[in-house]
Image: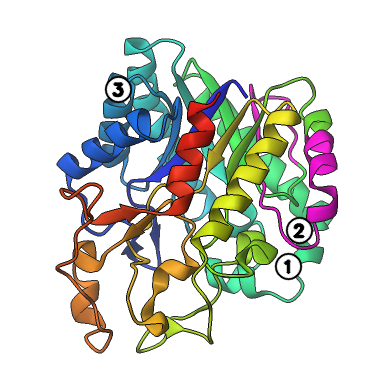
Amino acid sequence: MRRKGVCYDTGRELGGRSWRPDFRPGEVRRELEIIAGDLHCTAVKIHGADLSRLGWAAQVALELGLETWLAPDLWDHDAEDTLTHVVGGARIAEELRRAYPGRVCLSVGGEFSLFMRGIVPGDTVPERIARPDLRDLLRAPATQERLNEFLARVTAAVRPEFGGHITYGALLGEQVDWTEFDVAAVDLYRDRLMRPHFGRAVQLLKEKAGGRPLVIGEFGCCTYQGAADGGGTGYDIIDHGDQPHVKGDYARDEAGQASEITECLDIFDAGGVDTAFVHTFIQPLSPWNPDPRFDFDLASYSLVKSFANRLGPLVREFPEVPWDTTEHGTAYPDLPWEPKESFRAVAAWNAAR
């Protein structure tokens, strides 16, 4: 692969809640330094709803020598709001592109069928994901037509604002018309059903890319035994009720997460993928806990094990959860997390290539 990448979230928002509730610029800079240095990445895909955060983090990543992909994600809004937001992100990306030519790419969104209102019925992301007929809806010609009509509007609006390469992070079931895109990007998780023909799936995606570089916009695995079988739905083991907790008994399996990620990297590399972005570097809303009933990191795709001292108001919102807000890492004592086995495995994989 030409680039070795990881996803980095500056705070996407869902249900009024930021996925990065405590944004500390010094920590963000330090984490991006670690991504470039210790994780041996050459590219980072920066997600976020707050455009000022997104632009600031992208500037830091570029200063550190990372090729930077901006993903101005706005979830659960309608087409007009989404379009306005993406155009705002494109203007920020263009300022950075002029300062760092050839090193900035723009992702105009990702998995709009699920994350934007108006393509698949449902008022919220959880409602759309929970639909029993979701698979049939995604395959329906009318759904694909609505998606591609909106993507055509997006590319037409973004091109005058941004002079670099643009892409879109497609859900596997979305039949994207890539004509107006420079790069074809697909979010691709290997689950139990896909495992026997995963390499073939990569080849089919390359063919659909029509000669464009194929990028895996995100892939990864959660951190419990059997999580690889769930692929992109492995996160769904948490009860998010009055007192959030893990549903059932799950054994922590950092080695399994590491193995799944590196096996996928090998397949992408052998299959001629241009770039693959591991999902994800950190998930502050899924902190580790010594009590397995509250070890939300089990359901996390992150390469690092977060602690609960960056949850902000969530600690007060759920007082019955035994949060430990004093824990710090040992590998990086200045940061509120500890590398998992997957961090070390990805670092070694990247360093060897």
Q: Secondary structure at mark 2?
A: helix
Depth order, front residue of 55/121: 55
Name the residue beneath numbered marker 2.
138
Count of all numbered marks drawn on residues in the image: 3
Label 3 is placed on what type of residue?
Leu
Quick one: 89 or 78, which is closer to the camera? 89
Position of 19 with respect to 257 (left or right) is: left
Residue flagged by tag 1: what amino acid is it? Leu
> What span is in magenta?
176-205
Residue pointed to by mark 3: 64
Check contact, mark 2 vs mark 1: CB within 8 A.
yes
Percent position of residue 3, x then y: 54, 24
Q: Amino acid at mark 2?
A: Leu
Q: Which residue is mark 1?
A: 134
Residue shown at 23% from the left, 80% from the top: 317
Question: The C terminus is located in which quarter?
Answer: top right
